[in-house]
């Protein structure tokens, strides 16, 4: 090695690509010791760089967008990046508060290694999310990471309480605060009532409006939306289909229009309801894009659903909601005072079990009369 030259290396320079010489060294023979282009990566701009790690599930990603307005309030010059699983990224499309969406792939680790963040927010406890938080270069962490002994580290006492609730169903069941309350405390935001952000695209709005026109449904007609499924993972969250059928018949006879909202996983329930040949009831389809799905929800005056992504979308679109709860926590779900939560009085409510051997379980015990009464209190002809 030539010892007459200065080979000091500033590897924290924003221009250094880590695994090879930088462009200035290549093109100008620049050396770190006296290079005019040196910029420490942690001091590389006026903006506050914020990274959110929230990979899934889709409904959880969507409801976590409530943080964004608060983050922009606390960090007016904040630049927000969000790491998300590709299958859940659609709910972040066209969100005006997010500067970049990074979908997890084989380049994610490289992205983290090359960037520095003033704040990293990881509210996920999945192994992948914890690993990403640990790898990220940051001044401050909100939420969770791992230490060198694989212990989960919590950024404050609220994060520790949420971690314990995630580990003990007994604590989860006893919780009386919303997800928004806990996450705002973990991220140290000044309040917890920021709204979920559900962007609506013009193309999707037009598609939904054209759907109504094709059926000769007046824009002034009161519309009730029913999301009858609950996805594949949480079958026990699904309300009984015959209860939806009884509710649909009642409001059809009252002159309401009913739209069935769902995806491929909800196809069987939607077909079963349609097979009843109830008048004034229509399926919006099960193969819509996420923006189109949002636009169809936006047509509704009231949305009836279980604890699903549709619930969070309806909340973000400021719709009246009738939400039916069983195995998951009704206290945790925020509907912003715009609706009614229905639950049975069974002792094991909020068990978080994905299977159940109780014949008349929590979701079956909710009567269609309860649902009808709740809807009627929210919308009138």
Image: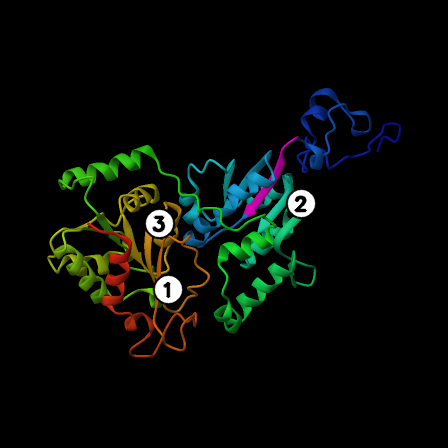
Q: Position of residue 269 (x, y in %)?
A: 23, 60
Q: Residues within 10 Å of mark 2 (few under 14, many from 20)?
A: some
Task: Find residue 138 and name its label.
Answer: 2
Q: Position of residue 66 (x, y in %)?
A: 48, 47
The earlier-in-sequence mark between 3 and 2 is 2
Q: Which residue is mark 3?
A: 314
Colour convention? rainbow
50 is within the stretch colored magenta: yes
| Residue at the outermost right position | 4
What SS does tag 3 mark?
helix
Task: Tell me how far mark 2 sits from mark 1, CA to CA.
Answer: 35 Å
Quadrant of the image for the N terminus?
A: top right
Q: Using residue 40 as the reference point, say whether residue 342 is left or right of it.
A: left
What SS does tag 1 mark?
loop
The reply to whether residue 105 is visible in this rendering is no
Q: Nearer the viewer, residue 156 or 318?
A: 318
Q: Residues within 10 Å of mark 1 (few under 14, many from 20)?
A: some
Q: Which residue is mark 1?
A: 234
- Residue at image position (36%, 57%) is 308
- Residue at image position (55%, 59%) is 125
269 is within the stretch colored magenta: no
The quarter of the displayed image where residue 6 is located: top right
Foreground mark, 3 or 1?
Answer: 3
Q: Using residue 35 as the reference point, say whether residue 187 is left or right of it.
A: left
Q: Position of residue 190 (x, y in %)?
A: 58, 48
Magenta residues, start to end:
46-52
The quarter of the displayed image where residue 159 is located: bottom right
Task: Tell me how far mark 3 sits from mark 2, CA to CA.
Answer: 35 Å
């Amino acid at each position: 090695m030539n010892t007459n030259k200065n080979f000091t290396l500033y590897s924290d320079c924003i221009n250094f690509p880590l695994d090879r010489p930088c462009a200035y060294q290549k093109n100008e023979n620049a050396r770190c010791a006296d290079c005019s282009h040196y910029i420490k990566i942690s001091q590389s701009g006026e903006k506050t760089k914020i990274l959110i790690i929230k990979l899934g599930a889709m409904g959880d990603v969507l409801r976590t967008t409530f943080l964004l307005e608060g983050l922009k309030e606390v960090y007016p010059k904040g630049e927000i990046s969000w790491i998300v699983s590709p299958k859940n990224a659609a709910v972040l499309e066209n969100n005006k508060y997010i500067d970049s969406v990074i979908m997890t792939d084989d380049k994610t680790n490289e992205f983290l290694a090359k960037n520095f963040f003033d704040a990293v927010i990881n509210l996920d406890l999945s192994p992948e999310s914890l690993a990403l938080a640990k790898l990220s270069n940051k001044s401050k962490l909100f939420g969770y990471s791992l230490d060198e002994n694989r212990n989960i580290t919590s950024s404050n006492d609220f994060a520790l309480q949420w971690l314990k609730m995630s580990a003990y169903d007994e604590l989860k069941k006893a919780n009386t605060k919303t997800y928004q309350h806990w996450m705002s405390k973990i991220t140290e935001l000044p309040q917890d009532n920021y709204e979920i952000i559900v962007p609506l695209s013009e193309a999707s709005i037009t598609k939904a409006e054209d759907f109504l026109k094709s059926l000769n449904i007046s824009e002034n007609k009161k519309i009730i939306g029913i999301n009858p499924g609950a996805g594949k993972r949480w079958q026990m969250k699904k309300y009984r289909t015959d209860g939806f059928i009884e509710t649909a018949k009642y409001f059809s006879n009252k002159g309401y229009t009913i739209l069935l909202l769902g995806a491929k996983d909800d196809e069987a329930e939607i077909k079963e309801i349609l097979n009843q040949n109830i008048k004034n009831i229509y399926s919006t389809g099960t193969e819509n894009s996420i923006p189109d799905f949002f636009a169809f929800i936006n047509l509704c005056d009231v949305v009836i659903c279980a604890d699903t992504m549709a619930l969070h979308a309806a909340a973000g679109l400021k719709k009246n909601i009738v939400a039916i709860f069983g195995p998951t926590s009704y206290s945790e779900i925020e509907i912003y005072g715009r609706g009614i939560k229905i639950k049975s009085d069974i002792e094991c409510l909020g068990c978080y079990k994905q299977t159940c051997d109780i014949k008349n379980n929590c979701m079956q015990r909710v009567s269609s009369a309860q649902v009808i009464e709740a809807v009627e209190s929210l919308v009138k002809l």
